[in-house]
Amino acid sequence: HVSVQRVLNNGVKIYLRRSDITDERVDAIVNAANKRLQHGGGVAAAIVRKGGRQIEDESRRIMSDRNGRPLDVGDAVHTSGGHLPCRFVIHTVGPIWKDRERERCISLLRRACLESLRLAAQLELSSIALPAISSGIFGLPKDICAQVMFGAVEEFSSSREAEFSILRDVRIVIIDDETISFFREEFVRRY
Ligand code: AR6
């Protein structure tokens, strides 16, 4: 669980931690979800496995309230944390990587991160943990994921939303060796 941290604008602290995000003691963890909130694999499956039925039931309710209309890529919605140690799960939809749509994927990942942070600020949360969104099943290159995610946290920390919120503890939590090596490299490069 070695963790590194830096203080950004408005006193927002960014942490990089190696851990299972479902164990994280924060107000909200972010799920790398899909447009239909079907939590089939990766971090999503781990979240519903540990969090229990409630997260799946609430996810279904969100979809039925939308009459089945899928979320847009970059959107963020929330459910409770069920049996997890966090109060909320913020479900965001990252892009499916396509080499030919590089810039579009980058801007959608940035939006997914920012929408998650904004939602946490609106919910008056003080801490949040994010996984390496889109870098697993959705195939987004891990070096690009690290650049975009740190960039989005910095952008949030400099925003009015951050200034007027109590969100001060932002963690990027990564479970595997390979992914964290890309994030460590980017962390060292930036800070
Ligand atoms: N804690 C922290 N990170 C984790 C954990 C965990 N418990 N489990 C996996 N990761 P992915 P995506 C990492 O595939 O690429 C699902 O089916 C993993 O190593 O979970 O956005 C959804 O329902 C990787 O680095 O998300 C969607 O359909 C990162 O989390 C689709 O996958 C993200 O990998 C989303 O794909």
Image: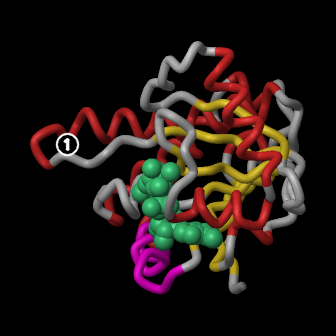
Residue 6 is at least partly visible in this image: no
Most distant residue in the left direction = 100
SS at circle 1: helix
Is 179 colored magenta in this rendering?
yes
Where the N terminus falls, by quadrant? Answer: bottom right
Query: In terms of image quadrants, where is residue 141?
Result: bottom left
The residue closer to the viewer here, 32 or 129, is 32
Q: As rendered, which of 63 and 135 lies closer to the eye? A: 63
Q: Main secondary structure of the magenta part?
A: helix
Residue at figure coordinates x 51%, y 37% from the top left: 112
Q: Nearer the viewer, residue 79 or 174?
A: 79
Query: Relative to residue 128, is residue 155 drawn left or right?
Result: left
First to last magenta residue range: 176-187
Q: Which residue lies at the image location 40% right of the left edge and 74% below the top edge?
A: 182
Q: Position of residue 6 (x, y in %)?
A: 68, 63
In the rendered structure, which amino acid carries the disc numbered 1?
Answer: Arg
Residue 32 visible to the viewer: yes
Which quarter of the figure has residue 10?
Answer: top right
Q: Is residue 184 left or right of residue 122?
A: left
**Residue under the point 58% across and 13% down:** 67
95 sits to left or right of 45: left
In the rendered image, which residue does mark 1 sit on? 102
- Structural crowding at the residue carrying mark 1, measured as other residues with C-alpha within 10 Å and reported as few (<14), some (14–19) or many (≥20): few
